[in-house]
Image (cartoon, helix red, strand yellow):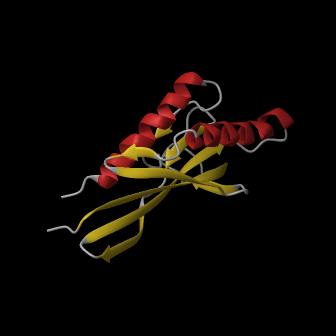
């Protein structure tokens, strides 16, 4: 049995939280899944893991996973607040790039890059909160592992 998905998630959690510890005012918090709301901004969360490919060949198998670290901030007319999302994405991406080819559960973690656009992320209203739209920018992260054919 492979624990590659768990190892992939755990490693990303460790790397992003190390960045937050070193830069607590740039990204304030990280979640392993999309939270219901955001208290302090900017923050980041891990999007769902996608199993992109599985290749079986000559007694081995390769698995390729991908996910995104999504950096979230508020919309604002203030230039400093607007630049804050880009500073957070650039800083976190640079930190993640240093972890390129890090070993994760017998596999390799690589950074694909960041989508160079913002997109709207709407948190749905609840009993005591209105719907809120945030700016968000995903950083794509890839993982791959090669092992003997599973039994």
Query: Depth check: 140 or 117 in front?
Result: 140
Going by the image, does 83 lie left or right of 124? right
| Identity of the residue drawn at 63% across and 36% down | 42
Going by the image, does 116 lie left or right of 61? right
Instruction: Report x, y in % for residue 70.
Output: 57, 49
Give the farthest residue toward the front: 58
| Identity of the residue drawn at 36% across and 52% down | 107
Vertical side of 95 occupied by 34: above or below: below
Q: Quadrant of the C terminus?
A: bottom left
Instruction: Report x, y in % for residue 68.
Output: 53, 54
Going by the image, does 77 lie left or right of 54? right
Question: Image quarter for residue 24?
Answer: top right
In this view of the protein, can residue 61 be seen by the observer?
Answer: yes
Query: Depth check: 130 or 60 in front?
Result: 60
Q: Quadrant of the N terminus?
A: bottom left
Instruction: Report x, y in % for residue 32.
Output: 42, 44
Instruction: Report x, y in % for residue 20.
Output: 55, 29
| Identity of the residue drawn at 38% across and 47% down | 9
Query: Depth check: 46 or 55 in front?
Result: 55
In this view of the protein, can residue 133 be seen by the observer?
Answer: no
| Identity of the residue drawn at 26% across and 52% down | 3
């Amino acid at each position: 049995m492979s624990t590659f998905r768990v190892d992939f998630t755990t490693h990303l959690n460790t790397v992003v939280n190390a960045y937050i510890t070193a830069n607590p005012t740039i990204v304030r918090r990280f979640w392993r899944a999309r939270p219901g709301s955001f208290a302090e901004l900017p923050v980041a969360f891990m999007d769902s893991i996608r199993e992109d490919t599985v290749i079986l060949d000559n007694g081995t198998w390769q698995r390729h996973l991908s996910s995104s670290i999504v950096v979230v901030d508020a919309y604002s007319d203030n230039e400093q607040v607007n630049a804050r999302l880009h500073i957070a994405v650039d800083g976190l991406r640079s930190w993640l790039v240093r972890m390129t080819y890090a070993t994760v559960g017998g596999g390799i973690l690589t950074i694909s890059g960041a989508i160079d656009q913002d997109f709207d992320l709407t948190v749905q209203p609840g009993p005591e909160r209105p719907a809120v739209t945030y700016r968000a920018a995903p950083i794509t992260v890839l993982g791959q592992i090669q092992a003997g054919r599973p039994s």
